[in-house]
Image (cartoon, grey):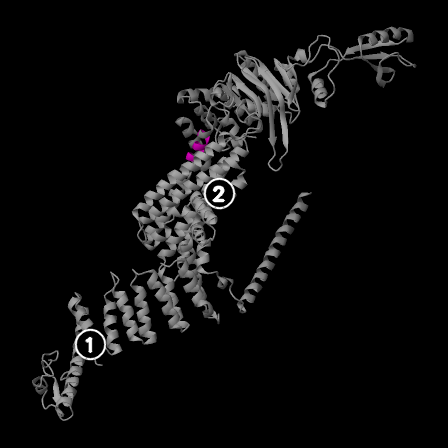
Amino acid sequence: MPILELLDVHKSYRSHLSIRKYWILRGLSLSIREGEIFGTIGTNGAGKTTTIKLALGLIFPDTGVVRLFGEDASKVESRRRVGFLPENPYLYDYLTGEEFLDFHARLFGLGAATRRRRVKDLLERVGLANRGDRQLRHYSKGMLQRIGLAQALVNDPEFVVLDEPMSGLDPIGRREVRDIILDLKARGRTVFFSTHILSDTEMICDRVGLLVKGSLKAVGTIDELVSREVPYWEVTLQGIVNGSLPCGRIVSRREDRILVRVDSQSDLRRLLTVLNGHGATLVSVTPARQSLEDLFIREARGAPPSPARADGGHAHSN
Amino acid sequence: MAPSLLRRGRSLMTLGALACLLLAVIVQGRIEGERRGGSVHPLLYLPSGKFLKVMALGFDGLLADVLYLWSIQYYGNYDIKDRFDYLERIYEQVITELDPHYLDPYLVGALIMTAEARKPEMALKLLDKGVRANPDQWIMPFEAGFLCYNDLHDYRRAAVYFEMAMRVPGVHPLVHRFQAEMYNRAGDKRTSLKEWLEIYKTTTDPYVRSVAWNHVHDLKVDVDLADLKDAVSRFRDKEERAPRRLQEIVASGLLQALPRDPENGDYLYDPWSGEVRYRGVPILGR
Amino acid sequence: MLTRISAIALNTFREAIRHRILYLLLIFAVAMISFAQILSLLTVGSEEKIIKDFGLASIDVFGVLTAVFIGIGLVSREIEKRTVYTLLAKPIHRFEFVLGKYAGLSLTLLVNTTVMTAWFFLVLLIKGMFDARLGVAVLLLFFQFLLITALAVLFSCLSTPILASVMTLALYVIGHLLWSLDLLSARLSTEAGRILCRALYYVLPNLGNFDIKGEVVHGLTVAPGRLLWATLYLLLYGSAVLWTACAVFERKELQ
């Protein structure tokens, strides 16, 4: 059973003053499997936060179904095993870190002794062990993010949802959050998060979903999405004096070296064979690998998808 | 900016602020001066009490208090020449409309109307309203009665008010004494005597009793003398001569018996002058 | 369920107590009551009425202001600033949130009113003007605060903080003007107009039910049933408002 399931969900919203409807999600279908780390990436306004809010029953779909642990997401009990960290969580400034976590623990009906233990453990886990007694309004942004994360884990949830968990953190903080997420996976939990920082996704996600303008343009493992196919090679040559090349494009020149770009294996072979005739030296051949960023930018700009992939993998909606 | 420049900028701003404040104070003083020169206080254009009651949103008692306090200050200021123009409006139409059970405005308003504005009828109108709105407050009709007595010298009217006050449970006993005396002043000694007798019989206060006795004493004398004079003249009409002795009047059937004076003595009769006299001296020397 | 509601209630109470605006209003109320003393020196006649009127009015006004601003601040702003996301992503029912908030606010108002009243009574005792019936007047004022808080919660669920404040204050004003609506209905010529007026009169919150300030200050008798009816009205009308708030919040989209 998928932990979270969205089936052909459409969501629109109407701004207060106009009658026009803005579509945020158009026919989104998504399924999160148990034990995986799933990251959604997308442009601003693509619908990442909306998807998360739908999953947690904070908003309701216009059409379509949202199911959490097999139950409709609007059902209150479906959230018992869920932990959530919103983007920029506005918290109760006047509470101390401990009081804040204790309050949330109370909402799960945890007993006093359990709460004390849990709060202590959580504070340690997120690196706030000595700051628990300070009021939240004296916390820095990074500290707030951490206490927010602690709050999301207060019930030892099976499914953890994080909206931009890395925002506001310095590289050390980001590394710590990454470690926590990986640790969750090691314990068999499922993690679903949205982010702008693609490098984080590449490092820890099992699967990635790319949201553009309300629909899922690509879903799958990093390998599936970022094809092994090499789109082009960059060849550095030395000693070409004049004449045009049989193929490829000169990208840049420096002193007597030029950087040439060829778009296919066959072009590359042609270029290399011709070199001998010109008396040039080959300095380097570098295949360009597509990164997630390339995929992101390409899809976000609405360019047509890349031609025939070697491995046959392509964007599917699951 | 360099620190010294910053400091200069700041002190400039402070100076500027103080200068503006000073100017503002001067301007305000000017405004006050203008106002003193006879312009009308805006509060005098008060809407009617009924309207204000709606606007007060449940704070009508408080609003009445505030307006009353203001009115005291206003009427205490003898500089304002035409301050009595709005007297009725303020007290009768506004303050007592807002809070009909607030007694001070009635009493003080009436006082101002009578003693200062010399409009006792206006005061009575206000007090009548107070009586209607507060039937359980004896002070209202009492004040009205006192006003009739002291300022209008209308003793009968005063007596009526005092009687109204007397009907209120818990009324101060002195009101009865006022009422009794009013009849005397109005010339109705008989009723006055009746009332003073009542007071004498019912009071437990020895001082009051002695006061009542004094009045009863003198009134009895007056009433008896009046009765006797009247009997003498009736005898004269009937017998066509003056009686030689007072007993003759009794004998002729025109009187049941001769009244005795308060010392249980007889009244003196002088057949030549036809005068009836009391042998003693009135206690209250009137 | 009760543990969750009480957890939210206590949390709300804690938040309210640490809110600076609460203290500001409290200080103002205390100052006003003290000011009454000074003002009463200006009067010719009894100063008792002035001190009592001012005292009760201060408690009334500042209680209402507290109910509105703390109520809106703690609910509407929370919804607007999205603190509420972390809460509602937990397994709690939306109505538990509404009721918990209301309970916390009511507790805050209780403390607030008690402090103001204690100061007021102290002043009266020192001056020898104390009258136990003033306690009843304050109790009814407290009921009024509870009703206004319920309205503040309802409008918080419906709208932005500023609009919610305006609407709640507007209903406070209207609630005190209802008796004039009654008078108006008698003067209307059309039957439809009269029916409309009557309907409005019953639907809108009748805050005059909780106002015995005038009677108590003047020492007039208050019908014993008055307190009972006022309590009943508060329970019923307040429940209606809170239920509506829960219903509204149940399907509210939290953008």
A75 vs A40, left or right, is left
Look at the magenta stretch and give its main secondary structure. Answer: helix
Where are the magenta residues, as a range?
Answer: C96-103
- Residue B3, position as x, y percentages in the image: 66, 43
> In the image, is residue A183 above or below residue B40?
above
Q: Tell me which corner region of the image, top left, top right, bottom left or bottom right, holds residue A33.
A: top right
- CB-based contact (under 8 Å), mark 1 and mark 2: no
Q: Which chain does the numbered disc 2 sit on?
A: C
Instruction: Let me know if residue C97 is in the magenta part.
Output: yes
Q: Chain of mark 1?
A: B
Compared to A135, does B103 lie above or below?
below
Q: Nearer the viewer, mark 1 or mark 2?
A: 1
Measure the alpha-carbon separation of dots 1 and 2. Answer: 69 Å
Judging depth in this view, the residue of A286 and B188 nearest the camera is B188
**Dot label at residue B190:** 1
Task: Return the mark for residue C140.
Answer: none
Q: Residues within 10 Å of mark 2 (few under 14, many from 20)?
A: many
Position of residue C54 in the picture relative to residue B213 (left or right): right
- Observer able to see residue A172: no
Which is nearer the eye, C125 or C106?
Answer: C106
Residue at the outermost front position: C191
Q: Position of residue B92 (x, y in %)?
A: 41, 64
| Residue C168, label in figure | 2
- In the rendered image, residue C25, in percent from the top left (x then y), is placed at 46, 45
B197 or A28: which is nearer to us? A28
